[in-house]
Amino acid sequence: MSHDLLQMHLKAVISCLVIVLYKVHTTKAGQFFSSGHTNNWAVLVCTSRFWFNYRHVANTLSVYRSVKRLGIPDSHIVLMLADDMACNYRNPKPATVFSHKNMELNVYGDDVEVDYRGYEVTVENFLRVLTGRLPPSTPRSKRLLSDDRSNILIYLTGHGGNGFLKFQDSEEISNMELADAFEQMWQKRRYNELLFIIDTCQGASMYERFYSPNLMALASSQVGEDSLSHQPDLGIGVHLMDKYTFYLLEFLEEVHPASQANMNDLFKVCPQSQCVSTPGHRTDLFQRDPGSVLITDFFGSVRKVEITKDTINLTSPVEPPIKRSGSSDIQIESLTYVDQLPVAEIIHQKPKQKDWHPPDGFILGLWTLILLVFFQTYGIKHLKHIF
Amino acid sequence: MAAHRCGLSLVCILIFSSLAHPSSCDTLEKANDNTAEKRSISEVNTDGSVAGEALNERQWQSTDAEVDRSDSTTHSEALTPAAARDEFQEELVIRPLHSGDIYASFQFRTLWDTDFLQEGQKVSHYRLFPKSLGQVLSKFSVRELHISFTQGFWRTMQWGQPFIPSPPGAELWVWFHDTVSDVDGNWKELTNVLSGIFCASLNFIDLTNTVQPSASFKPLGLGNATDHRFLRYATLPREIVCTENLTPWKKLLPCGSKAGLAVLMKSEKLFHSSFHSQAVHIRPICQDEQCSSKAWELRQTLNVVFDLHTSGQGKKEWSLFKMFSRTLTEACPLASSSKVYVDITDNPEGELFELSPATPLLGQAVVLGDRRTYSVYDLSRAETFGQLRSFNLLLRWKGDSGDMLRPLLHAERYVAGFGLQTGEIHTVIYNNHPYRAFPVLLMDSVPWYLQLYIHTLTVTSKSRDNKPSYIHYQPAKDRHRPHLLEMLIQLPPHSMTEVTVQFERALLKWTEYTPDPNHGFYVGSSVVSALVPSMVAMRTNFTQDQPLFSSFVPVKEESSYFVRVYTEPLLVNLPTPDFSMPYNVICLTCTVVAVGYGSFYNLLTRTFQVDEPSPPLSKRLANLIRRMRGVPLLT
């Protein structure tokens, strides 16, 4: 009897162990999908113009580089650069934008695709990209086609102040406009979770007014503090990066697509000893605990991978072109090229038939005046000769 | 007891089987897929019967083209769809220039004999022709498309004529098919789509900078009717060209930038040059010499001039590695021909420069009115790459080259005048031919904010009035349309012709200024099109084995060749307000109001009251005690 009981207990223990192991297996798989997002987007904006704001373009490009390296494809990144630094005539090394002095790291690279550039980077275009209200002829690469399962990373850099961010030295976006734009995105379910990073002076003021759920925000400085630039390069002649983004880049260089680093590590980037300004963050609107949110949830990308064991035979790529000998029975007259400068034809060209437009106000007024004067002087009895 | 045991083991088995379940599901599904594929292949096998056609192509084509072939003849070949053949050729031409610079011109051509615009035949299988461009062509019924992005200005006096000219900035001109009813709507959408494809701000092209030339820009492809209502031309002189434009351009090539000549395109070297121009030209051309059917040609060209002092470090010694920081290792496997040409016309005996590795192949071509000799390197042959499997061309100068022959046609443009109200545009065209006169067509497109006074237009040659035989002028409409001026001028031999017109600068509305208005506003280049007399008889018939750089412009007569010269773009300053003034005015006014009115208001309404200060603590305590005692309080 006791032997049987022992065996029963043993079986129970074994089954419990099996169930526990099974649960562990599912939690690891479960954790993979627990964040609830299926695709990643990034909107990276540099809002400053002119050569001395080189560092803002370098900031944006370094985040672009990290985000691309961790897996988000170009089709899911909307990159907005307000001015061109790489091919600027003042750049001693064209087609490069460096982040470290002595030209150590070229963040511009050889494979960059800028979606909005130059004068296109305006407050209106930025808000239209976020809310999706773009004119119908806008190409896909300029749209943020996110859905309710997208995690979006938004990075802004430039010159800012208490409650505003300057766009291109001519207009501003206020923190209330930004908060309203995010609320519009929430109402239209255009994001699952949103991470907002801003690197400007008094950056924390920009996230003060957010009121939509699932938003997490980071800023490089508190209200009343300035964000400082990192180091100048004497060869190029300008400051290359801002302090906060420089240390953010150094942190992200260590992150790889399978890394388990979470948001708490990101909050620790650039403490006051390194940055001089105090970086701030806001997580009260965020549903999950920041410690359980992976960096790659926003900076990396979810990819579906299907493994197949089939082999496909590729045929040889080039077949010699077969000259088709007059296969059609119908005789087509031989086509000709157009004369590039037919002088005789041009000289005798008839003037274009212009469309008839009704006479505009001036002509009508003039004729009315003439008729009035005529009838004034000669009397109304001449009217019957006209009509 | 036994039942319990059985039950427990059953539970264990169930748990284990559920763990193992997912993988078996996958394998079952994969097996299903395999059988489905095999079934489809066998179906197509029984259908197709013509030998010599690739199986793969028919798998794709049969679903599309079978339905559309119902109206064709009962010819046996018509029942089976003919696979649209496409062909890719690449070449690089290197031309050493007299100033010590070196001119490299890449041309990639994809020829495809299909018709996008034919009714009933939907093209859905793209092989070498890029799908993004093919879809654009069929959606907007485009007959011809020419787009170019240029950084720098081509110096005709120092470098001669380029193979394919282009103006600084971005230039787009399109011929639409005559079935299009709303050309302007198609044009607007086309520019937006192209701005997405090429990562450029082409969406700034709108009616204020689009013109419809009446005689210039005739189609370079096949066609007979040329109704200029279907032509649109626009240029953005401010457009910047950088790596983000090169990246999508490279992606249009069949081999990308992985194999063939495109591996040489490294942006760090290409943009560190005096002139960089990349272009895409799409047009219908003759498929063969009889010219009985059309084929679509996509040409991607990249012209770059490397400067002697910045890229060459002052030494007159050029190699592929020095120019592009790469060497060639293989030809593009998808190319039917891949060649490198080096212009050795000025070096017949090898006394000017030395070329290595030496090649026995020589080619001659008549291009730009001159017969030039080229050393040809065929990259499809393995021996070109030598032992090291890498091809690096080396040109070492030995002697000093003499002066370059002056180009026959040359144009310049500048703004004269002072102040911010009026000015004068001068366009100077030089005809350097000693005894031949020829006509040129000058096209000017000036933005509306420079208000031209056409009554001050003068054309003088050799200090005498030269009346143009054809003038087409379309005046500007404020904020709607730019000026368009086209003139056919006969240039006397060996002369300088000057075209001047005065203008007045407009004051824009404050929202119309760019964020950096003090930089100035650009006026696009003038275009001078001419048939220049050539020194050598040009070939009028096209052969398939002609090198690409000599077969771009169709030649109609032997004695002259067509050339297009672009002038400099102009940079004019418009009267610019001080944009900090609204802020200054608000500050000043508010200060004045606050100080002036505020103090006046205070004077009138303020009343003074005596206010007892609160007594110190000791006095308060003393008062408390005194109150308790009933004694009079302290003041």
Image (spheres, coloured by chain):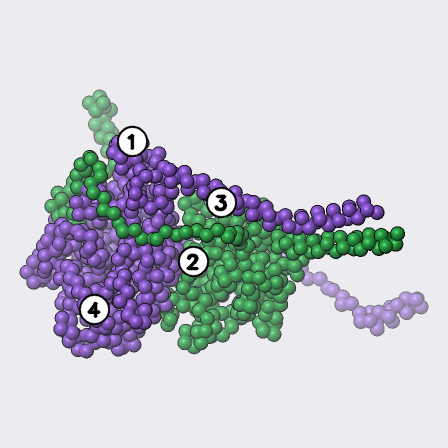
Please state, as top left, top right, bottom left or bottom right, where the C terminus of chain A lies in the image.
Answer: top left
Q: Kindly give the residue lying farthest to the right in the view shown.
A: B629
As displayed, is residue B210 above or below residue B354?
A: above
The 10 Å Cα crowd at callout 3, few under 14, some 14 to 19, many 20 or more, is few
The residues tagged by marks 4 and 1 sit, at their Cα atoms, a distance apart of: 53 Å
For marks 2 and 4, give the one nearer the viewer: 4
Given this view, does label 4 or label 3 mark the residue nearer the observer? 3
Secondary element type, mark 1: helix
Q: Chain B is drawn in which colour?
A: purple
| Residue B388 left/right relative to B491 | right
Residue at 51% in and 52% down = A308
* Amino acid type, residue under disc 3 in the picture: Asn
Disc 4 is attached to a residue of which chain? Answer: B
Chain A visual colour: green
Q: Which of marks 4 and 3 is nearer the N terminus?
A: 3
Q: Position of residue B473 (x, y in %)?
A: 21, 47
Q: Which chain carries label 1?
A: B
Does the residue at mark 4 contact the one at mark 3 (Cβ under 8 Å)?
no
Which image quadrant for residue A373? top left
> Which chain's residue wears label 2?
A
Towards the viewer: A308 or B456: A308
Asked if marks 2 and 4 touch (Cβ < 8 Å), the reply is: no
Q: Where is residue A43 in the image (x, y as percent from the top left)?
A: 50, 56
The residue tagged 4 is: B359
Marks 3 and 2, how far apart at CA: 42 Å
User: Badge 3 is on which residue?
Assistant: B34
Of B383 and B554, nearer the camera is B383
Say what secondary structure mark 2 lies in: loop
Q: Which of marks 3 and 1 is in front?
A: 3
Label pair 2/1, CB-CB below 8 angstroms: no
Camera-side residue of B408 and B443: B408
